Image (tube, rainbow, N blue to C red):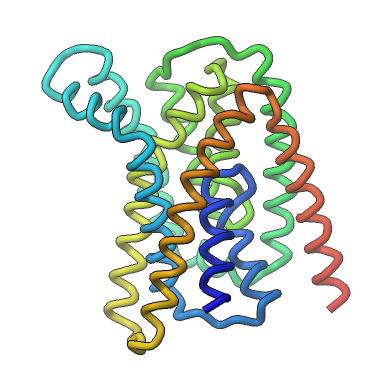
């Protein structure tokens, strides 16, 4: 049971903090020597973090839903979210097998964590110049490409998307808000795919369901705290903290892999 709690904790923290949930889950499973029920656990954990976003951004979601029936700025935001989702949908389907193979390599995870660390240090600099409050269509496409790159374990989805937003001139909190809204279809798609794979390829013992529930609830609760914490740190210009952390974890993973 403790293993499910730990993996839920890792997922909840790292799905939204810019340090890569997929990379940390790979490392966590290796260090814990724990063989979880594969894709079903991933689906359950994604469901927990998805609910966290829905809870915190429910007002934005209601506003955007109403905006579908108007010609105001909300409709433009919806178009940007759709445009930003296209890259990850295409790349995820076309390169699914190659992406999944990357999850078996700690070295790939380590290198991607180093890339994430570098991106976050750039974001810390770019955030000082970024002042724009709105996301344009071309911004959304670039941010969407960054989100697709985060399919690789070790590339942080939130880190890559927020950094890209800041680089193109979007103010930090607005870049983060768009990043979290953009995560909804991405997380929903990932969870749906994992659930489908689990239902068609695996069977789960009844005794494992309490552990899966613990993992999901932990990911949900910690995810809410992580989102609030990240928004506060972005306001204070503290993204470099995560950049340094990713560099340390990436280098430590390389040392661990070479030593063993």
In the image, residue 140 above or below residue 244: above
Which quarter of the picture shows residue 237? top right
Q: Is residue 6 above or below residue 129?
A: below
What is the total number of numbered labels drawn onto the structure image?
Answer: 0
Q: Position of residue 153 (x, y in %)?
A: 59, 58
Q: Relative to residue 56, is residue 206 depicted above or below? A: below
**Residue lying at 59% horizontally and 29% vertically, measured from the top left:** 232
Instruction: Judge from the rendering whether residue 103 lies leftward or rightward of residue 195; answer left or right.
Output: right
Q: Position of residue 227 (x, y in %)?
A: 51, 39
Is residue 108 shown above or below 73? Answer: below
Q: 118 or 65, which is in the foreground?
A: 65
Residue 260 lies in what quarter of the image?
bottom right
Q: Residue at x 58, y 22 (%)?
A: 166
Q: Relative to 12, is 32 on the left or the right? A: right
Which is nearer the eye, 140 or 176?
176
Left or right side of 148 for 254: right
Q: Residue furthest left?
A: 69
Residue that appears at 52% across and 23% down: 173
Residue 163 position in % (x across, y down): 60, 30
Left or right of residue 153: residue 95:
left
Seen at 61% across and 22% down, the residue is 235
Image location (x, y in percent) of residue 38: 46, 77
């Amino acid at each position: 049971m403790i293993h499910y709690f730990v993996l839920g904790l890792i997922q909840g923290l790292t799905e939204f903090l810019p340090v890569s949930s997929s990379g940390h889950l790979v490392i966590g499973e290796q260090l814990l020597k724990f063989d979880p029920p594969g894709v079903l656990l991933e689906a359950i954990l994604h469901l927990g973090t998805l609910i966290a976003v829905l809870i915190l951004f429910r007002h934005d979601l209601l506003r955007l839903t109403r905006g579908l029936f108007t010609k105001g700025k909300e409709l433009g935001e919806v178009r940007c979210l759709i445009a930003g989702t296209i890259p990850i949908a295409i790349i995820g389907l076309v390169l699914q097998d190659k992406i999944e193979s990357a999850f078996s390599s700690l070295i790939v995870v380590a290198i991607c964590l180093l890339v994430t660390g570098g991106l976050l240090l750039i974001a810390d600099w770019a955030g000082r110049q970024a002042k724009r409050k709105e996301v344009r269509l071309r911004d959304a496409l670039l941010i969407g490409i960054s989100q697709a790159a985060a399919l690789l374990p070790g590339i942080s989805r939130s880190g890559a998307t927020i950094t890209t937003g800041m680089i193109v001139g979007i103010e930090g909190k607005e870049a983060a808000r768009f990043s979290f809204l953009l995560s909804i279809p991405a997380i929903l798609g990932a969870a749906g795919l994992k659930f489908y794979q689990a239902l068609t390829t695996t069977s789960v013992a009844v005794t494992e369901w309490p552990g899966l529930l613990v993992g999901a609830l932990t990911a949900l609760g910690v995810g809410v705290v992580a989102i609030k914490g990240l928004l506060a740190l972005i306001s204070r210009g503290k993204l470099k903290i995560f950049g340094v952390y990713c560099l340390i974890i990436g280098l430590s993973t390389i040392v661990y892999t070479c030593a063993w």
